[in-house]
Image (cartoon, rainbow, N blue to C red):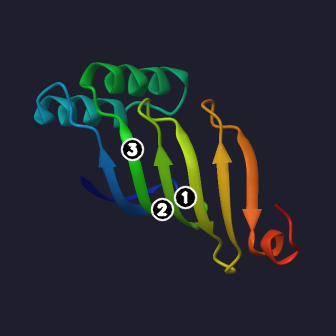
Amino acid sequence: MQLIGLDEHGHAFAGMAVNDVPAMPIQQVLDEQKKIDAMPDGAAKTRAQAQLREQSGITPRYFAGKSRSGNSVVMLQDATGAPRLALMVTPEGKASIEFLDASGKVQRTLTANDTAAGKP
């Protein structure tokens, strides 16, 4: 379980995350993550993140908090770490539920208006 608070390039997010147990010692994971965090943004950093996730066995499963876009979010991931269900509330108070496929593409979105209008 993690408590997270990050502010990068003017985009802040904070929350609580639950991950599957790591396959390697946590200190080794943290040391490798520091190296990756110091890398410039781009494809190499993205590949390094994926490789560390694969090697460490850490798989994100749950996140609750504030996203970089400022939304309040509860995100549930499958066993591979792919987001599959997102509950969101915008800063303006608009709530929605998103169902995602294994690649992260939104398959269906429900809002309060959908229910009120009698949509399935």
**First in sequence: mark 1 vs mark 2:** 2
Residue pictured at 11% horizontal, 30% vertical: 25
Check contact, mark 3 vs mark 2: CB within 8 A: no
| Quarter placement of the C terminus | bottom right
Q: Nearer the viewer, residue 119 or 63?
A: 119
Q: Could you say whether the residue bearing mark 1 is in a helix, strand or loop?
A: loop
Q: Could you say whether the residue bearing mark 3 is in a helix, strand or loop?
A: strand
Res 116 quadrant in image:
bottom right
Label 2 crowding class (10 Å Cα cut-off): few <14, some 14-19, many 20+? some
Left or right placement of residue 36 versus residue 75 in this view: left
Check contact, mark 1 vs mark 2: CB within 8 A: yes
> In this rendering, is residue 53 above or below 10?
above
Badge 3 amino acid: Arg
Badge 1 amino acid: Arg
- According to the picture, the residue beneath numbered tag 2 turns out to be 12
Residue 17: percent from left, percent from top: 34, 53
Q: Could you say whether the residue bearing mark 2 is in a helix, strand or loop?
A: strand
Return the mark for residue 61.
3
Left or right placement of residue 2 versus residue 77 in this view: left
Residue 48: percent from left, percent from top: 40, 22
The CA distance from mark 1 to mark 2 is 5 Å
Badge 2 amino acid: Ala
Instruction: Name the mark nearer the viewer: 3 or 2.
Output: 3
> In this rendering, is residue 117 above or below 44?
below
Q: Nearer the viewer, residue 63 or 111?
A: 111
Residue 78: percent from left, percent from top: 46, 37
Residue 18: percent from left, percent from top: 31, 50
Return the mark for residue 50.
none
> In this rendering, is residue 35 above or below 69?
above
